[in-house]
Amino acid sequence: GDVSPQPPFSAIPADLRTLADYERRAEAHLMPEVWRHIQEGAGREITLSENRAAFDRIGLLPRAMARLDGSTEIELFGRRHASPILLAPLAYQRLAHPEGELACVRASTALDTGMVVSTLSSMPLEDIAAAAHAIARDLGKAPAPLWFQLYLQPEREHSLQLVRRAEAAGYEAIVLTVDAALKPAGIRLPPGVDAVNLAGMPRPTQTSVPGGRILLGTPLSDAAPGWDDLAWLREATRLPILVKGLLLGEDAARAVDEGADALIVSNHGGRVLDGLPSPVDLIQTVAEATQGRVPLLLDGGVRMGTDVVKALALGASAVLIGRPQMHALAVAGMPGIAHMIHLLRTELEAAMAQLGCPNRALLGPDRLVALGR
Ligand code: FNR
């Protein structure tokens, strides 16, 4: 059969109406190994499927005849987001489209949507910020909030360089990912796709562990974050810090004690340790442990407006979406991303209205019920 992928569309096909439509279409636009890399989960993909199943087990309890004037807007760190939906950090977005992260940031700016740029972005972090400012100028608006996701480097000096570059480029928060240090790279990068932000820095690589000891003295363990690294980062920057990849209340409370300004409850989209529960099933215990001291965000398996509603009702201030970005990029580049965000936001608005909860404040666990599935 024909293995070369279809080029992206320049206009959005009319039959794309949901994120699931984009996902179905995307495979034909991607090299098979790239498609597998995007979609895959760790191990037997128990966690990957749990991320969807946890949403599907939750039912919604609508209030009848409610007033329907409301808003999906939220504020985080003093900045307005048009909705509680942000773009999660994804490595190497040029795997899905030649414009990669630039397509994403233009779409997110056009739609007042926050974007988190990965340490492993395939465009320089400065160019991504510049593209956001350029399109914001063209559109006569402020650029959408941009946050920088930090993977700690084996040398602290290199992590610091990344933080300083992000600050200088106008990024408004640092997202410290703490759950992926021992994750293998996962794909052989095609020509033209690289971790350009890390030029001149040694890369942590997967090495086998000598003598049956657990990861002592390997490059991987050198880059594995510890609590001392969070304390260091807190001293190193005045930007708000989000810790991404916590699941347990105890860790969450400690991260807040150590200066985190927000948390992202996440299992890395089921890509690291198979067998982890879904963030949806854990966020309430995280909320109990942190007592409203910081905003909680959540990611993993968010694909519909009703998923966002459920996350908000369980205590999330916002959600992030991962794989759907790659699907939308592959199918239609920048307009694809913009359309995908628009679809999800429109579904969220409809779901909030239909639930009789047009405001975030009206959404609580009393609007949810366990489905007997
Ligand atoms: C990721 N994720 C991720 N997280 C991070 O902090 N830094 C990164 O560079 C990446 N890279 C990355 C690449 C790809 C292809 C995927 C699918 C995921 C995890 C990501 O931010 C997010 O936590 C999950 O993708 C959320 O789950 P869903 O929306 O993909 O189900």
Image (cartoon, rainbow, N blue to C red):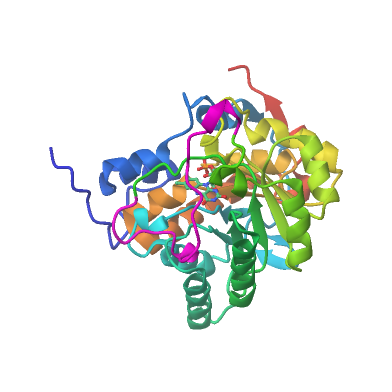
Horizontal side of residue 80 vs 220, given as left or right: right
Height in image: 315 above or below 91? above
324 or 1: nearer the eye? 1
Instruction: For residue 95, say whether it is visible.
Output: yes
Given residues 138 and 41, the one toward you in this image is: 41
| Residue at screen point 62% across, 77% down | 168
Is 111 a magenta residue? Answer: no
Q: Most extreme residue toward the front, as rendered?
A: 211
Residue extending farthest top: 372
Left of 30 or right of it: where is 289?
A: right
Task: Please tell me which residue lies in front, 343 or 134.
Answer: 134
- Residue at the spot 69% in from the left edge and 35% down from the top edge: 62
Q: Is residue 76 above or below residue 24?
A: below
- Residue, x 49% and y 54% (percent of image)? 203
Q: Quadrant of the N terminus?
A: top left
Looking at the image, which is closer to me, 104 or 310?
104
Q: Above or below — where is 281 with respect to 115?
A: above
* Residues shaded magenta: 189-214
Relative to 92, is 47 above or below? above
Residue 70 at x, y = what percent?
70, 56
Residue 123, how many percent across, how many down? 43, 66
